[in-house]
Image (cartoon, rainbow, N blue to C red):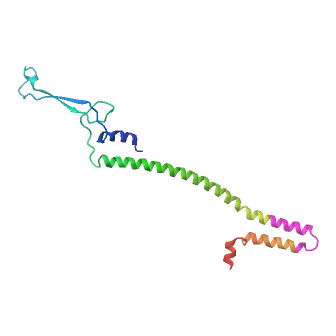
Amino acid sequence: MIDLDALKARLAEYDDAVPRCQGKVARTINCAPDHLTSEDPTYHEYIITTYSPCCRPEGHEGDCRNSRSVMGWPGFVTVSALVAEVERLRDEAELLRTGLDATRAYADRVETEALYLRGERPAAVAWLLARAGETANRRPGNENEISLIYSLVADMFERGEHRKEVIDEAR
């Protein structure tokens, strides 16, 4: 995973809109001719010290320096846009993860309900058959007809004829 905070901190050195450190970087060189040795009294007259402004942002950590690594292509603007895009995509991914969790919870509820409903048809058929048996045993007179009706309705339920799709296909 990209460490965006570290990338942004390093990228800040290249932002021209950020105030610069007011520190100076000293560079001392000796430009004495090759024939002069360090024991020669005029050798030290060739020492030159230059001071360059620090190129780092104000309040930086570590020592001042007057150069920075060459960023090269794609440049500050492009890398800044890249960082912003990664941050936006991370936020979007988090929203998607949250939505996925909610979707999974909903799917679990629907699956539980579907499992419950799958048991409804056998339960209704069993109830109708039980009623058919009870009717045949308790009612005087037309008990066979009522029992037969319960049995026929149970068979229709078992075949799924009570469902609209089955009725439409039969037409």
Q: Quadrant of residue 42?
A: top left
Query: Residue 9 at what x, y percent from top left?
Result: 36, 39
| Residue 152 horizontal side relative to residue 136, left or right | left
* Residue sitting nearer the eye, 19 or 63: 19
Residue at image point 30% right, 46% down: 76
Q: Quadrant of residue 28?
A: top left
Vertical arrangement, residue 46 with respect to residue 156, above or below: above
Residue at image point 74% right, 65% down: 121
Task: Specify whether residue 114 is painted magenta.
Answer: no
Q: Residue furthest left?
A: 35
Task: Specify whether residue 133 is painted magenta.
Answer: yes
How many numbered marks are there?
0
| Residue 79 horizontal side relative to residue 152, left or right | left
Vertical arrangement, residue 73 with respect to residue 139, above or below: above
| Residue 170 horizontal side relative to residue 11, left or right | right
Q: Residue furthest bottom?
A: 171
Viewport quadrant of the C terminus = bottom right
Residue at image point 92% right, 67% down: 138
Q: Main secondary structure of the magenta part?
A: helix
What's drawn in magenta, residue-wise?
127-144
| Residue 3 horizontal side relative to residue 52, left or right | right
Residue at image point 51% right, 52% down: 96
Vertical arrangement, residue 2 with respect to residue 116, above or below: above
* Residue sitting nearer the eye, 3 or 36: 3
Q: Residue furthest right?
A: 140
Asked whether residue 13 is in view, the answer is yes
Query: Residue 4 at what x, y percent from top left?
Result: 40, 43
Viewport quadrant of the N terminus = top left
Query: Residue 127 at what x, y percent from top left?
Result: 81, 64
Query: Residue 7 at what x, y percent from top left?
Result: 36, 41
Asked whether residue 3 is in view, the answer is no
